[in-house]
Image (cartoon, rainbow, N blue to C red):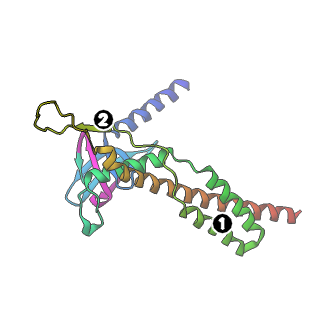
Amino acid sequence: MKTSFIILFALLFSGVNSFSQDTLVFLSGKTLNGNINSINDIGVSITSRGLLFKNTRYFYNDELFLMSKKGQRTMLYAMDSANGNVFSIEQMDYFIKGLQEGKEHYHAPFATLGGLASGVTGGFFGFWGMTIPTTYVFITGIKTPKINMPLQISEELISEKEHSLPEYGLKFNSPQELVQTDVDIYTPYYNYGYQEAAKDKKIKNAIRGGIIGFIAFVATSYIMISK
């Protein structure tokens, strides 16, 4: 029995891996691994596999940033202000990095606790009490979260450029000029993406907490009254 379980697990694991050589990166920051089946001017078809079943889906190019098929990366995003794509490819790249970092590393436990407390408080006032957690969610979404994952680039942060001036008598040592680098140029786009993801997580946590708190209070009250 134990041997059969190990063999089954190995087959499932190998099956998942066999559908993981291609990757789609979405403008939302989401990534999807699987086998890319077809590509055309409109979109991409990809088959991904969960624990038991395969799932084939089609995504339009305007949802995607890039795809990686058998290790070869192809850019699907194009700057087009008519479609709302006002960022350049490089700017969008750092914006998506910010989204991904925000989703992975930003946590909002206080938003959850606050939503829970507002839900319980709202439950005390009955149906109209739902305005309390709703107001809390609105207030939570107004405040911009802080960045706690600074943009990291392996290149030099600041490069130096010397002026080439003619020498008359004694050598003239001109002051060195600081030149903008990728960190200076692209950090705002990374920060914007991170804050968007963090704010989205705060709002969702506040909503979850509010719903759970409200339902918990109502259920507890009903049980106590029934006794």
* Residue occupying image coordinates x 27% and y 37%: 159
Quadrant of the frame with the C terminus: bottom right
Name the foreground residue: 72 vs 92: 92
Task: Give the residue at the far front of this rendering.
Answer: 169
Q: Are the residues at dot 1 and dot 2 in contact (C-beta closer than 8 Å)?
A: no
Q: Which residue is mark 1?
A: 133
Q: Is residue 126 above or below residue 212?
A: below
Q: Which residue is mark 2?
A: 156
The residue range painted magenta reads: 55-73
Rounded to the nearest whole Å, what is the CA distance between mark 1 and mark 2? 47 Å
Query: Percent x, y for residue 96?
Result: 36, 51
- Name which of mark 1 and mark 2 comes first in the sequence: 1
Identity, as a three-letter code, of the amino acid under mark 1: Pro
Task: Give the residue at the far bottom of this rendering.
Answer: 128
Query: Percent x, y for residue 126?
Result: 75, 72
Between marks 1 and 2 in the image, the one whose residue lies nearer the viewer: 2
Q: Is residue 77 above or below residue 142?
A: above
Tell me the element at label 1.
helix
